[in-house]
Amino acid sequence: MALNVGELCLGVLTMSDATGYEIKKLFEEGHFSHFIAASYGSIYPALQSLMKQELVTCRQESQEKRPDKKIYSITPEGRNAFQRALNKDLAPDTFRSESLFVMMFAHLMPLAQVSKLIDGRLAFFDQAIALFGSDECSSEEDGLLANSNWERSGADYARGLGLAVYTAEAAYLRANRHMLEALAIQPSSEAAE
């Protein structure tokens, strides 16, 4: 059974109080974007539901020339609910890759396009490897995580695994790009002239 968006929000709130925007950012661009998808449109209804269930509280903080900021905090009941959610059997992990799907059809693409696709993937991997391998990943990428009392051991494990996976995939692609490029439609000698 998969964790629902409310349970994901509770998990974030175990680390630190947060706004809905901060939670959304973690799932869309931050540390959690590598694991689970939770959209803006699902986070706010989940937070409202959690408030009704008294699993989180909300306080408003005034801002100059902007609407009040809503800051959510987990309650002891919310922490207990999240701990129960952690004990559920999890759904199997899924892997989806649009680039891998497209690479399956390298034989239908021009060599220049295949090479461009490979170079783009390698640039992505190199960027991810640099991020996962840096100290900034563990302390500064997300202000919410940097300011929390979150236990680092689990996060360090996930970061290390991400680094290992991206490093292995980049190495495999570098060592085997010739296989895809050999399948690609080669430019004709007339087109080259």
Image (cartoon, helix red, strand yellow):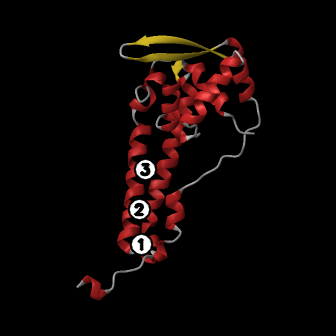
- Residue drawn at 73 percent across, 21 percent down: 81
Local packing at callout 2 (Cα closer than 10 Å; few below 14, some 14-19, many 20+) is many
- Residue drawn at 48 percent across, 76 percent down: 107
Q: At numbered mark 3, what does the secondary structure look like: helix, strand or loop?
A: helix
Q: Earlier in the sequence, mark 3 or mark 2?
A: 2
How far from the left and from the top, in percent, is residue 79? 68, 18
> Is residue 133 visible from the viewing direction of this image?
yes
Left or right, residue 77 beside residue 145 = right
Residue 184, above or below 79: below
Q: Are marks 2 and 1 in contact (CB under 8 Å)?
A: yes
Left or right, residue 110 beside residue 154 = left
Q: Amino acid at mark 2?
A: Ile
Q: Earlier in the sequence, mark 3 or mark 1?
A: 3
Q: How many marks?
A: 3
How far from the left and from the top, in percent, is residue 32? 54, 35
Q: Earlier in the sequence, mark 2 or mark 1?
A: 2
